[in-house]
Image: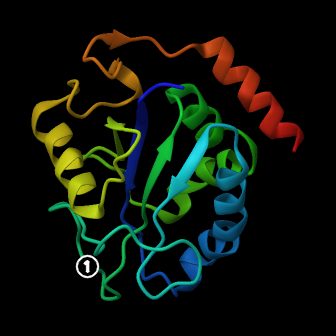
Amino acid sequence: MSSFILAAYTFALFHDRYESERISGFRDAEPGAFAAIEQAPGFLGRSGYEGDEGPKSWGKQVFPRFWVDNGDGFAPSTLSLWETPEALAAATYHGRHGAAFRRGREWNVLPVNWPGYVLWWVDVSHRPDWTEAVARHEHLADHGDSAHAFSFKALFDPHGQPLRLDNRRTKSLGANLARS
């Protein structure tokens, strides 16, 4: 096993408050999407949220400067760790989470002026917190893809070298998720 693992932070803005009828589909899909992610091959862990049941929060949850409070003090965001980019891509775009992801426009504002996610490598012994994740997210927004903060469009390996997603491996992992 590598001494590095992939960290992923996602961020979005809802069209309306979390408790609104417009977001009810998200609320309905969220438990199953989290369960699918947590059962996906290559998933290593995720931060929970302060005050919620489930995994412990990895520090105080903060939001990037792109956050606009719609009145409930909340924004859909996640922080997780993965063995490989292929495992993350498969879990994101396939299976139960992929089905919910494809409905995202119903619930979320399109990320025009900010990235919807950021990826970066961490030492296997390091668990990033929300503040680190937001700093990486804002760095990607300000500077574009680099070894410090990147997206699937321009991956880097843990040593800062460009990396190509193994699409065959991603599809194979995704096909297994679709069957589960």
Q: Up-down: is 128 above or below 40?
A: below
Task: Indicate the position of residue 21 as horizontal and vertical percent values.
Answer: 58, 84
Which quadrant would the C terminus be assigned to in this image?
Answer: top right
Q: Up-down: is 155 above or below 8?
A: above
Name the quadrant containing residue 76.
bottom left
Q: Up-down: is 174 above or below 106?
A: above
Q: Name the residue nearer the viewer: 20 or 77.
A: 77
Secondary structure state at the residue bearing disc 1: loop
Residue at 60% across, 44% down: 43
- In the picture provided, is 145 more to the left or to the right than 101? left
- In the picture provided, is 138 more to the left or to the right than 19? left
Is residue 169 at all visible to an observer of this figure? yes
Dot 1 crowding, Cα within 10 Å, few <14, some 14–19, many 20+ = some
Task: Indicate the position of residue 25 as horizontal and vertical percent values.
Answer: 65, 71
- In the picture provided, is 122 more to the left or to the right than 171? left
Which quadrant would the N terminus be assigned to in this image?
Answer: top right
Is residue 113 at all visible to an observer of this figure? no
Task: Indicate the position of residue 45 as horizontal and vertical percent values.
Answer: 54, 54
Identify the amino acid type marked 1.
Asp
Residue at 66% across, 45% down: 98
Residue at 29% across, 62% down: 130
The residue beneath circle 1 is: 69
Q: How is the image coloured?
A: rainbow
